[in-house]
Amino acid sequence: MTEVTVYVPRDSAARSVGADQVAERIAAAAGPRARVVRNGSRGLLWLEPLVEVETPAGRVAYGPVTPDDVEDLLDAGLLDGAGHRLCLGPTEEIAWLRDQTRVTFARVGVIDPLSPDDYTAHGGLAGLRRALSLAPEQVVAEVTDSGLRGRGGAGFPAGIKWKTVLGAESDLKFVCCNADEGDSGTFADRMLMEGDPFTLIEGMAIAAWATGASEGYIYIRSEYPDAVATMRAAIDAAYARGWLGKRVLDQDFTFDLFVRVGGGAYICGEETSMLESLEGKRGTVRAKPPIPALEGLFGRPTVVNNVLTLGSVPMIMADGAEAFAGLGVGRSRGTQVFQLGGNIARGGIVETAFGITLGELVEGYGGGTRSGRPVRAVQVGGPLGAYLPTSRFDLPMDYEAFAAAGAMVGHGGVVVFDDTVDMAGQARFAMEFCAAESCGKCTPCRIGAVRGVEVIDRIVAGENRSANLKVLNDLCHLMTEGSLCAMGGLTPMPVRSALTHFPGDFGATSEEERR
């Protein structure tokens, strides 16, 4: 009897809708006929739990599968990839997946996340092996030439940051991965850590070799217990294989890696707040200069990148800078992992080259709203990102185009709202969110957000609207220019965009709208 491999995701999103129970039912009912592998999610979240069966012609997908569907699927010939009402056909031919350009997520959903053999069989470690054959300066040059920019929000060129750390004089340097993924509508960091943790480990090892670092930390938010467990298990496996520790891959290179769990503060998504937390202090923003690349963790030179940035590095080193730079537009090179959420028919992960339009993401991949009502607004870039109307659906997803439109790509989160949304309420939420999550260190953020809530309430209530609109505009300017970090500096972005594109929700008169 030939054993058939069946894949059932162990991703948190899939588990939340019954993937564990589906896997248990398949294992119990199929017995020795099936080998159940818990893979990462392919990112088609509306079809989870998505079950895949290995056949001579490739994998065949079924979904969404409930525990009660398992017996019927097996009777219909699931293990042979037979037809069924839940059959989606060959996995790689599903349009959602077929049309993507997966780089960072190339192995997610394909491999067993905790199998080192599976990782290397699908191209893993090629980037690290090549990096170790080059001088650190050459690795930094490769990352610089690729055009890789930070995927955490600011879009700062990764190569410049690495070059600064490499050139800094110190007997101890660090690489820190900020996995405190707190933006609304974002989940790519979690999915990569749960679905392909060795990619992050490899990326951090390359960064350490390139900059002269010997110690690394992955700072993961406490709300991600599965990601924490997966990363720790993967790190243990990497040590056992000689991928971490002394003499990495039998080279004269030592790199130790640890996981630290955050305390749930949104502000720790900001790099200096994260460093404070890593040092055992309260997460508050540091003044810059000095920059972390020169004086970071415990005052030592430190590379701080997020999960998607470091997860892109292995491909850059394996395939060369030109392959990565060949994707994208303008100064936005490579791919971005866009996350579709909110009121959307088909939510999930879309990795594609920069340049795809907002409308292609929302209407093409996302299929419009889940409610079936018209889309009214889309927020891109987390809770501090701009609200964009459907008239801006032609906007290409790239850093410069969004900046010119008064918006930001950020971490790639795309949250959709239908025509029932109250945009004045959303603007108020931005100020309220900032007031709750501010570290309190600087006055514009700490006090400005509280005053912002009050002013918006007065505007909506119709109290001296023209004067209060001017006060709100002045307050936004002060917060943007005077805040110590992006928390207070970006809070005005959703407020201003809501006022600009949806003035009627604030009770604006036609005269005020013309102004």
Image: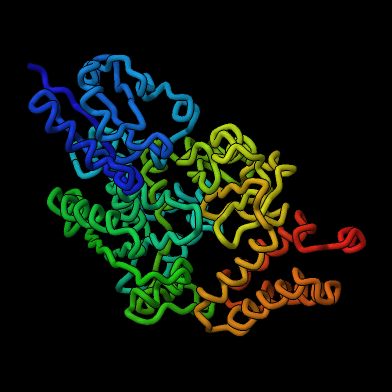
Residue drawn at (24%, 20%), measured in percent from left and top?
A: 78
- The number of discs equals 0
Which of the 4 image quadrants contains residue 55? top left
Front-lying residue, 192 or 390 = 390
Q: Quadrant of the C terminus?
A: bottom right
Residue drawn at (58%, 77%), measured in percent from left and top?
A: 484
Residue drawn at (86%, 59%), measured in percent from left and top?
A: 513
Front-lying residue, 70 or 298 = 70
Q: Quadrant of the N terminus?
A: top left
Q: Is there any visible trace of residue 199 in the rendered image?
A: no
Indicate the position of residue 423 as horizontal and vertical percent values.
68, 58
Q: Is there any visible trace of residue 179 in the rendered image?
A: yes
Residue drawn at (64%, 61%), measured in percent from left and top?
A: 426
Q: Is residue 513 left or right of residue 368?
A: right
Which of the 4 image quadrants contains residue 393? top right
Image position of 353 with respect to 193: above or below: above
Front-lying residue, 212 or 181 = 181
Indicate the position of residue 65 as horizontal and vertical percent values.
31, 32
Image position of 184 with respect to 465: above or below: above
